Amino acid sequence: MWPYHPDLLARPVPRYTSFPTAAEFTGAVGAAEQGAALERTSGDVSVYVHIPFCEEICWYCGCNTSRTNREARLTSYLDALHREIAVVGSRLGKDVRVRRIAFGGGSPNAISPLEFVRLTDVLTLHLPLHDPVLSIELDPRTLREDWGMVLRCVGVTRASLGVQTLSPRLQQAIGRVQPREVIARGTELLRRSGITSLNYDLMYGLPGQTDEELSETLAGAVELGADRVALFGYAHVPHLIPRQKRIDASALPDQDARFRMAWNGWAQLTGAGYHPIGFDHFALPGDALAQAAVAGTLRRNFQGFTEDQAPVLLGLGATAISQFPDLIVQNEKNAGRYRMLLSQERLPGALGIVRSAADQATGLLIEQLLCVGEARVGRDKLVQLAGSLAPFIERGLADAREDWLVIHASGLPYARTIAALFDPYRQDSMRRFSSAV
Ligand code: SF4
């Protein structure tokens, strides 16, 4: 097992899907900066489309999503989204090439297949698509047969299923009941529909979860043939996510058990032939994510680990975040205000941060520590952080070599904690983050 040092995991740290993190966004950045950034964008671009609806809301979920119980609200959101796509498309530089589109949420299959086709038509009409790779997050509970044909016709080749656990007892405990047959049927439908890379999102650290229950779920994921597995630790933060109050906190595994579960998951999945990506993601050797990890080209963006190399990610939809080399901007979070802005054909950027040259350098350093396990951090930084790095180096989790910092395989669970040492914003507000394991 990885060496366990609870003192080094006591400090909550960000997931670092961006740098600076969303905790640093302010209203000083908005639509004006967003528009200017769109106009100076060129080259390869990836797009993320946010659908903030689900048919059922899971108790653990921290996503910005709501129930699809009011047709009018859903329709007006999609109208606004269509307008945003047109407005953004009209502001983009001429030589932009959209090479990837990811649909996420929420659950994109909370809208109807017909609405999804309309959405892809609008994207085709207004954005410079260059044979993009299409991916989608799906809720297996509402993945009906007609979605299969639509995904094939539109050309979606990658999908991610929210599975979390195959244990019926734990599914009850987290408010997401979806029998194994539902997952198996959804998987089979997606394979028939041309999905060549299929991810399962799974969780450890669930209330009352045993090692055996986790092992059975992992074995099920392997048996059902997931190409990728993301094994997240459940973060219980009801002060930030009130819907989590329905989860029995008294039954949550303690830090020791969580660490053991993370290790067990790593050992079981790598033993089954998966390539580890960081310490909690896994991909079969033929999958593009594993190939990027082997080639040393793995990246990290708002969707987590990715092989995507595009320097710009455009987020479309309420709360969606766009990342440019020198700017991060988040769309209006309030759905009503988002619709109002788009009814006036205004860009919906409302929050964000300008990425200074120093931010960009720190962001690259953190990304390399998390994706490659090493970074040239510079002698000055090593000297400046010698005291903070010492507990990791003395325990053999990392090493300073000339001006490089190298995280060893035994230090993988501590990578986010080590990365946080280089984050100048991370001196306060730790309550906003979760444990690294
Ligand atoms: S289906 Fe996914 S996005 Fe929707 S509530 Fe459940 S976990 Fe959240």
Image: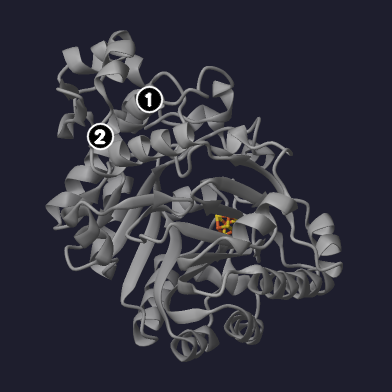
The local secondary structure at tag 2 comes to: strand
> Mark 1 is on which residue type?
Gln
* Above or below, comparing residue 377 to residue 182 in the picture: above
Residue closer to the observer: 224 or 199: 199
Which residue is pictured at 32% across the width and 47% down the height?
214
Q: Residues within 10 Å of mark 2 (few under 14, many from 20)?
A: many
Amino acid type, label 2:
Ala
Judging by the rendered image, the residue that carries numbered circle 2 is: 375
CA separation, marks 1 and 2?
Answer: 29 Å
Residue in the picture at 72% in, 48% down? 30
Residue at the disc numbered 1: 255
Counting labels gives 2
Residue 290's quadrant in the figure?
bottom left
Figure check: 229 above or below 386: below
Place of residue 205 in the rendered image (x, y in percent of width and height, measured from the top left): 41, 37
Q: Of marks 1 and 2, which one's residue comes earlier in the chain?
A: 1
Say if 364 sits above or below 287 in the image. Answer: above
State which image quarter holds ligand 1: bottom right
Residue located at (41% from left, 18% from top): 10
Locate residue 227, reporting x and y percent. Answer: 27, 66
Nearest the viewer among 20 and 411 is 20
Residue at the image point whose x is 33% and y is 47% from the top: 213
Q: Position of residue 236 (x, y in %)?
A: 53, 34
Residue 392 placement, left or right of 256: left
Q: Quadrant of the C terminus?
A: top left
